[in-house]
Amino acid sequence: MTSRERVRKAIHFQGPDQMPHYLPDDEENDLLWLWVPRPPEIQPWTQTGRIERRIDEWGTVWERFLGAEDIGEAKEYPIKDITQQAQLKFPDLNNHKYFHDVISTIEQNKVAEDPKYCLGVMPFNALNEGTHGIMGLENMFVAYYEYPAHLKALIARLAEAQRISICRLADCGCDGIMGYDDWGLQDRLMVSWELIEEFFMPHYRENWKLAHDLGMDVWMHSCGYIVDILPAFAEAGLNVVQMDQQENIGLDRLNEVAGGKIAFWCPVDIQKTMVSGTIEDIQNYVKRMICTLGSHNGGLVSMAYSTPETVRHDPKKTAAMCEAFRKFGFYEKTI
Protein backbone atom coordinates (compact mmCIF):
# COMPACT_ATOMS: atom_id res chain seq x y z
CA MET A 1 0.00 0.00 0.00
CA THR A 2 1.43 3.38 -0.95
CA SER A 3 1.36 6.34 1.40
CA ARG A 4 -1.21 8.01 -0.83
CA GLU A 5 -3.49 4.98 -0.66
CA ARG A 6 -2.97 4.75 3.11
CA VAL A 7 -4.15 8.31 3.72
CA ARG A 8 -7.14 7.95 1.41
CA LYS A 9 -8.26 4.73 3.10
CA ALA A 10 -7.75 6.17 6.58
CA ILE A 11 -9.83 9.29 6.00
CA HIS A 12 -12.58 7.34 4.22
CA PHE A 13 -12.72 4.60 6.89
CA GLN A 14 -11.64 1.85 4.51
CA GLY A 15 -9.14 -0.04 6.68
CA PRO A 16 -5.57 0.95 5.74
CA ASP A 17 -2.65 -1.23 6.77
CA GLN A 18 -1.69 1.31 9.47
CA MET A 19 -2.31 4.86 10.61
CA PRO A 20 -0.88 7.50 8.27
CA HIS A 21 1.71 9.84 9.79
CA TYR A 22 2.95 13.39 9.41
CA LEU A 23 5.57 13.70 12.14
CA PRO A 24 8.84 15.67 12.62
CA ASP A 25 10.95 12.67 13.62
CA ASP A 26 12.93 12.08 10.40
CA GLU A 27 10.97 8.90 9.74
CA GLU A 28 8.90 8.24 6.63
CA ASN A 29 5.67 10.22 6.41
CA ASP A 30 2.58 9.67 4.30
CA LEU A 31 1.55 13.09 3.06
CA LEU A 32 2.99 16.24 1.56
CA TRP A 33 1.58 19.44 3.08
CA LEU A 34 1.89 21.95 0.26
CA TRP A 35 1.70 25.72 0.70
CA VAL A 36 1.46 28.12 -2.22
CA PRO A 37 3.83 31.11 -1.90
CA ARG A 38 2.14 34.46 -1.31
CA PRO A 39 2.73 37.87 -2.85
CA PRO A 40 5.24 40.08 -1.04
CA GLU A 41 3.98 42.10 1.90
CA ILE A 42 3.36 45.79 1.38
CA GLN A 43 5.88 46.48 4.14
CA PRO A 44 8.05 43.95 6.02
CA TRP A 45 8.80 44.35 9.72
CA THR A 46 10.16 47.88 10.11
CA GLN A 47 11.32 49.50 13.33
CA THR A 48 9.33 52.51 14.50
CA GLY A 49 10.64 53.69 17.86
CA ARG A 50 10.20 50.86 20.37
CA ILE A 51 7.94 48.79 18.13
CA GLU A 52 8.10 47.02 14.81
CA ARG A 53 5.39 47.40 12.22
CA ARG A 54 4.53 45.45 9.07
CA ILE A 55 1.74 45.70 6.51
CA ASP A 56 0.68 42.40 5.01
CA GLU A 57 -0.43 41.79 1.44
CA TRP A 58 -4.05 42.60 2.36
CA GLY A 59 -3.18 45.95 3.91
CA THR A 60 -3.61 44.91 7.54
CA VAL A 61 -1.15 46.72 9.83
CA TRP A 62 0.57 44.57 12.46
CA GLU A 63 2.67 45.73 15.42
CA ARG A 64 4.87 44.04 18.01
CA PHE A 65 7.45 45.07 20.56
CA LEU A 66 10.95 45.50 19.21
CA GLY A 67 12.85 42.22 19.47
CA ALA A 68 9.75 40.05 19.80
CA GLU A 69 9.44 37.04 17.52
CA ASP A 70 5.66 36.55 17.55
CA ILE A 71 3.26 37.38 14.73
CA GLY A 72 2.29 40.65 16.36
CA GLU A 73 -1.15 42.19 16.86
CA ALA A 74 -3.38 43.63 14.16
CA LYS A 75 -3.81 47.36 14.68
CA GLU A 76 -5.44 48.63 11.48
CA TYR A 77 -7.64 46.87 8.96
CA PRO A 78 -8.09 47.59 5.24
CA ILE A 79 -11.89 47.53 5.60
CA LYS A 80 -12.86 50.26 8.03
CA ASP A 81 -16.45 50.53 6.76
CA ILE A 82 -18.15 47.28 5.74
CA THR A 83 -20.54 49.20 3.48
CA GLN A 84 -17.48 50.06 1.36
CA GLN A 85 -16.12 46.50 1.19
CA ALA A 86 -16.53 46.25 -2.59
CA GLN A 87 -13.80 48.86 -3.01
CA LEU A 88 -11.14 46.61 -1.45
CA LYS A 89 -9.04 44.94 -4.13
CA PHE A 90 -7.98 41.46 -3.04
CA PRO A 91 -4.31 40.49 -3.39
CA ASP A 92 -3.50 38.30 -6.40
CA LEU A 93 -3.10 35.10 -4.38
CA ASN A 94 -4.41 32.84 -7.15
CA ASN A 95 -1.91 34.00 -9.77
CA HIS A 96 -0.60 30.99 -11.73
CA LYS A 97 3.01 32.04 -11.09
CA TYR A 98 2.74 31.16 -7.41
CA PHE A 99 1.86 27.52 -8.11
CA HIS A 100 5.05 26.48 -9.92
CA ASP A 101 6.72 24.89 -6.87
CA VAL A 102 3.58 22.96 -5.98
CA ILE A 103 3.32 21.62 -9.52
CA SER A 104 6.99 20.61 -9.52
CA THR A 105 6.68 18.83 -6.15
CA ILE A 106 3.60 16.90 -7.25
CA GLU A 107 5.20 15.88 -10.55
CA GLN A 108 8.21 14.50 -8.67
CA ASN A 109 5.91 12.73 -6.23
CA LYS A 110 4.05 10.98 -9.05
CA VAL A 111 7.16 9.09 -10.12
CA ALA A 112 8.41 8.35 -6.58
CA GLU A 113 8.67 4.77 -5.39
CA ASP A 114 6.17 5.54 -2.63
CA PRO A 115 3.99 8.46 -3.77
CA LYS A 116 2.59 10.56 -0.95
CA TYR A 117 -0.86 12.08 -0.51
CA CYS A 118 -0.64 15.70 -1.71
CA LEU A 119 -2.56 18.14 0.49
CA GLY A 120 -2.64 21.66 -0.93
CA VAL A 121 -3.46 24.67 1.24
CA MET A 122 -5.79 27.00 -0.62
CA PRO A 123 -4.30 30.49 -1.14
CA PHE A 124 -7.74 31.84 -0.17
CA ASN A 125 -8.00 29.40 2.70
CA ALA A 126 -10.42 31.09 5.12
CA LEU A 127 -13.93 32.50 5.00
CA ASN A 128 -14.55 33.28 8.68
CA GLU A 129 -10.94 34.08 9.58
CA GLY A 130 -10.44 35.71 6.21
CA THR A 131 -13.31 38.08 6.88
CA HIS A 132 -12.38 39.20 10.38
CA GLY A 133 -8.73 39.29 9.31
CA ILE A 134 -9.47 42.23 7.02
CA MET A 135 -12.16 44.03 9.04
CA GLY A 136 -11.56 43.07 12.68
CA LEU A 137 -13.46 40.56 14.80
CA GLU A 138 -15.43 43.12 16.79
CA ASN A 139 -16.51 44.91 13.62
CA MET A 140 -17.55 41.59 12.14
CA PHE A 141 -19.70 40.77 15.17
CA VAL A 142 -21.48 44.11 14.76
CA ALA A 143 -21.92 43.59 11.02
CA TYR A 144 -23.82 40.32 11.52
CA TYR A 145 -26.69 42.36 12.90
CA GLU A 146 -26.32 45.90 11.56
CA TYR A 147 -24.98 45.29 8.04
CA PRO A 148 -25.79 41.65 7.17
CA ALA A 149 -26.14 42.24 3.43
CA HIS A 150 -22.74 43.91 3.17
CA LEU A 151 -21.11 41.22 5.32
CA LYS A 152 -22.63 38.48 3.16
CA ALA A 153 -21.31 40.24 0.06
CA LEU A 154 -17.76 40.26 1.44
CA ILE A 155 -17.93 36.60 2.45
CA ALA A 156 -19.28 35.74 -1.01
CA ARG A 157 -16.30 37.51 -2.62
CA LEU A 158 -13.90 35.44 -0.51
CA ALA A 159 -15.81 32.25 -1.34
CA GLU A 160 -15.60 33.00 -5.05
CA ALA A 161 -11.84 33.55 -4.79
CA GLN A 162 -11.60 30.30 -2.84
CA ARG A 163 -13.26 28.42 -5.68
CA ILE A 164 -10.51 29.63 -7.97
CA SER A 165 -7.95 28.35 -5.43
CA ILE A 166 -9.67 24.96 -5.48
CA CYS A 167 -9.52 24.79 -9.27
CA ARG A 168 -5.86 25.83 -9.30
CA LEU A 169 -4.93 23.07 -6.83
CA ALA A 170 -6.93 20.52 -8.79
CA ASP A 171 -4.98 21.51 -11.90
CA CYS A 172 -1.76 20.96 -9.91
CA GLY A 173 -2.83 17.40 -9.12
CA CYS A 174 -3.58 17.68 -5.40
CA ASP A 175 -5.37 14.83 -3.64
CA GLY A 176 -6.95 17.15 -1.09
CA ILE A 177 -7.41 20.83 -0.31
CA MET A 178 -7.10 22.47 3.10
CA GLY A 179 -8.68 25.54 4.65
CA TYR A 180 -8.47 27.33 7.99
CA ASP A 181 -11.43 28.58 9.99
CA ASP A 182 -11.41 28.49 13.80
CA TRP A 183 -15.01 28.37 14.97
CA GLY A 184 -14.68 27.68 18.68
CA LEU A 185 -13.88 29.43 21.90
CA GLN A 186 -12.76 27.25 24.80
CA ASP A 187 -16.27 26.15 25.78
CA ARG A 188 -18.67 27.25 23.04
CA LEU A 189 -18.92 28.30 19.42
CA MET A 190 -17.62 31.74 18.46
CA VAL A 191 -21.08 32.66 17.11
CA SER A 192 -24.39 30.83 17.02
CA TRP A 193 -24.97 27.92 14.69
CA GLU A 194 -27.77 29.93 13.07
CA LEU A 195 -25.28 32.61 11.96
CA ILE A 196 -22.83 30.00 10.67
CA GLU A 197 -25.63 28.36 8.70
CA GLU A 198 -26.91 31.62 7.26
CA PHE A 199 -23.62 33.34 6.41
CA PHE A 200 -21.18 30.49 5.71
CA MET A 201 -22.70 27.07 5.12
CA PRO A 202 -24.02 27.78 1.60
CA HIS A 203 -20.46 28.66 0.56
CA TYR A 204 -18.92 25.69 2.35
CA ARG A 205 -21.37 23.34 0.65
CA GLU A 206 -20.73 24.80 -2.79
CA ASN A 207 -16.95 24.92 -2.45
CA TRP A 208 -16.57 21.51 -0.85
CA LYS A 209 -18.79 19.98 -3.54
CA LEU A 210 -16.59 21.61 -6.16
CA ALA A 211 -13.51 20.03 -4.59
CA HIS A 212 -15.18 16.62 -4.54
CA ASP A 213 -16.34 16.99 -8.13
CA LEU A 214 -12.70 17.67 -9.04
CA GLY A 215 -11.60 14.48 -7.28
CA MET A 216 -10.20 16.00 -4.08
CA ASP A 217 -10.88 15.50 -0.39
CA VAL A 218 -11.60 18.46 1.90
CA TRP A 219 -9.56 19.16 5.05
CA MET A 220 -10.03 22.05 7.47
CA HIS A 221 -8.21 23.33 10.52
CA SER A 222 -10.64 24.42 13.21
CA CYS A 223 -9.96 24.59 16.93
CA GLY A 224 -11.88 25.37 20.08
CA TYR A 225 -15.18 23.89 21.17
CA ILE A 226 -16.45 22.87 17.73
CA VAL A 227 -18.02 19.50 18.48
CA ASP A 228 -21.55 20.82 17.91
CA ILE A 229 -20.90 21.70 14.25
CA LEU A 230 -18.85 18.69 13.17
CA PRO A 231 -21.78 16.48 12.08
CA ALA A 232 -23.16 19.30 9.92
CA PHE A 233 -19.71 19.96 8.47
CA ALA A 234 -19.33 16.27 7.66
CA GLU A 235 -22.74 16.23 5.97
CA ALA A 236 -21.76 19.32 3.97
CA GLY A 237 -18.67 17.55 2.63
CA LEU A 238 -15.80 18.06 5.08
CA ASN A 239 -13.68 14.90 5.15
CA VAL A 240 -11.01 15.76 7.73
CA VAL A 241 -10.83 18.22 10.62
CA GLN A 242 -7.41 19.23 11.90
CA MET A 243 -7.65 19.92 15.65
CA ASP A 244 -4.80 20.85 17.95
CA GLN A 245 -6.82 20.71 21.16
CA GLN A 246 -9.33 18.01 22.03
CA GLU A 247 -9.46 17.96 25.82
CA ASN A 248 -11.78 20.95 26.10
CA ILE A 249 -14.30 18.66 24.40
CA GLY A 250 -13.03 15.21 25.35
CA LEU A 251 -12.05 12.32 23.10
CA ASP A 252 -15.07 10.26 24.08
CA ARG A 253 -17.45 13.12 23.30
CA LEU A 254 -15.75 13.82 19.96
CA ASN A 255 -15.96 10.15 19.07
CA GLU A 256 -19.60 9.92 20.12
CA VAL A 257 -20.66 12.87 18.00
CA ALA A 258 -18.33 12.72 14.98
CA GLY A 259 -16.38 9.47 15.04
CA GLY A 260 -16.76 7.60 11.76
CA LYS A 261 -18.43 10.63 10.17
CA ILE A 262 -15.36 12.79 9.86
CA ALA A 263 -11.67 11.92 10.11
CA PHE A 264 -9.25 13.68 12.48
CA TRP A 265 -5.72 14.97 11.88
CA CYS A 266 -4.42 15.65 15.36
CA PRO A 267 -1.45 15.85 17.68
CA VAL A 268 -1.79 15.10 21.37
CA ASP A 269 -3.75 17.99 22.92
CA ILE A 270 -1.40 20.98 22.82
CA GLN A 271 -2.91 22.88 25.75
CA LYS A 272 -3.03 20.22 28.45
CA THR A 273 -1.37 16.83 28.07
CA MET A 274 1.53 18.06 25.92
CA VAL A 275 2.20 20.82 28.48
CA SER A 276 1.44 19.31 31.89
CA GLY A 277 1.45 15.58 31.16
CA THR A 278 4.28 13.13 31.72
CA ILE A 279 5.84 11.00 29.01
CA GLU A 280 3.58 8.16 30.15
CA ASP A 281 0.53 10.45 30.00
CA ILE A 282 1.39 11.32 26.41
CA GLN A 283 1.80 7.68 25.44
CA ASN A 284 -1.53 6.78 27.05
CA TYR A 285 -3.24 9.71 25.33
CA VAL A 286 -2.02 8.48 21.95
CA LYS A 287 -3.50 5.06 22.71
CA ARG A 288 -6.81 6.66 23.69
CA MET A 289 -6.89 8.70 20.46
CA ILE A 290 -6.44 5.54 18.42
CA CYS A 291 -9.03 3.62 20.45
CA THR A 292 -11.61 6.39 20.01
CA LEU A 293 -11.14 8.60 16.96
CA GLY A 294 -9.26 5.85 15.11
CA SER A 295 -11.69 3.06 15.94
CA HIS A 296 -13.75 3.27 12.76
CA ASN A 297 -11.67 1.23 10.34
CA GLY A 298 -9.50 4.34 10.16
CA GLY A 299 -10.37 7.92 11.05
CA LEU A 300 -7.14 9.31 12.53
CA VAL A 301 -3.95 10.74 11.01
CA SER A 302 -1.07 11.66 13.31
CA MET A 303 0.73 14.98 13.41
CA ALA A 304 2.71 17.27 15.72
CA TYR A 305 2.02 20.93 16.38
CA SER A 306 3.88 22.89 13.73
CA THR A 307 5.33 25.58 16.05
CA PRO A 308 5.91 23.81 19.38
CA GLU A 309 8.17 26.55 20.71
CA THR A 310 5.28 29.03 20.73
CA VAL A 311 3.31 26.81 23.13
CA ARG A 312 6.33 25.74 25.20
CA HIS A 313 6.36 22.08 24.30
CA ASP A 314 9.32 20.12 25.63
CA PRO A 315 11.16 18.54 22.67
CA LYS A 316 11.42 15.32 24.70
CA LYS A 317 7.63 15.19 24.94
CA THR A 318 7.26 15.81 21.23
CA ALA A 319 9.69 12.96 20.57
CA ALA A 320 7.71 10.71 22.92
CA MET A 321 4.48 11.55 21.11
CA CYS A 322 6.02 10.73 17.72
CA GLU A 323 7.40 7.46 19.05
CA ALA A 324 4.01 6.51 20.49
CA PHE A 325 2.19 7.27 17.24
CA ARG A 326 4.67 5.10 15.34
CA LYS A 327 4.52 2.28 17.89
CA PHE A 328 0.78 2.11 18.46
CA GLY A 329 -0.46 3.42 15.12
CA PHE A 330 -2.13 0.24 13.97
CA TYR A 331 -5.87 0.40 14.24
CA GLU A 332 -6.17 -3.23 15.27
CA LYS A 333 -3.38 -3.06 17.87
CA THR A 334 -4.23 -0.20 20.19
CA ILE A 335 -4.30 -2.00 23.52
Image (cartoon, rainbow, N blue to C red):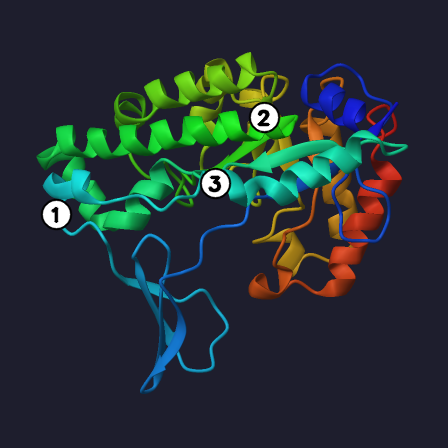
Q: Where does the image place residue 179, in percent across and percent down from the top left? A: 49, 35
Q: Where does the image place residue 125, in percent across and percent down from the top left? A: 45, 38
Q: CA distance from mark 3 to mark 2?
A: 14 Å
The residue located at (22%, 45%) in the rendering is 88
In this orientation, which residue lies closer to the viewer: 74 or 79?
A: 79
Direction front: furthest residue: 97
Residue 169 is left or right of residue 180, and the answer is right
Q: Earlier in the sequence, mark 3 or mark 1?
A: 1
Residue 267 is left or right of residue 116, and the answer is left
Badge 1 local density, few (<14 within 10 Å), some, or many (20+)?
Answer: few
The residue located at (63%, 51%) in the rendering is 305
Against 176, is 129 above or below?
A: below
For residue 335, which quarter of the picture? top right
Residue that numbered label 1 is attached to: 81
SS of the residue under disc 1:
loop
Residue that numbered label 3 is attached to: 123
Residue 45 is left or right of residue 85, and the answer is right
The residue located at (15%, 52%) in the rendering is 80
Badge 3 local density, few (<14 within 10 Å), some, or many (20+)?
Answer: many
Q: Earlier in the sequence, mark 1 or mark 2?
A: 1
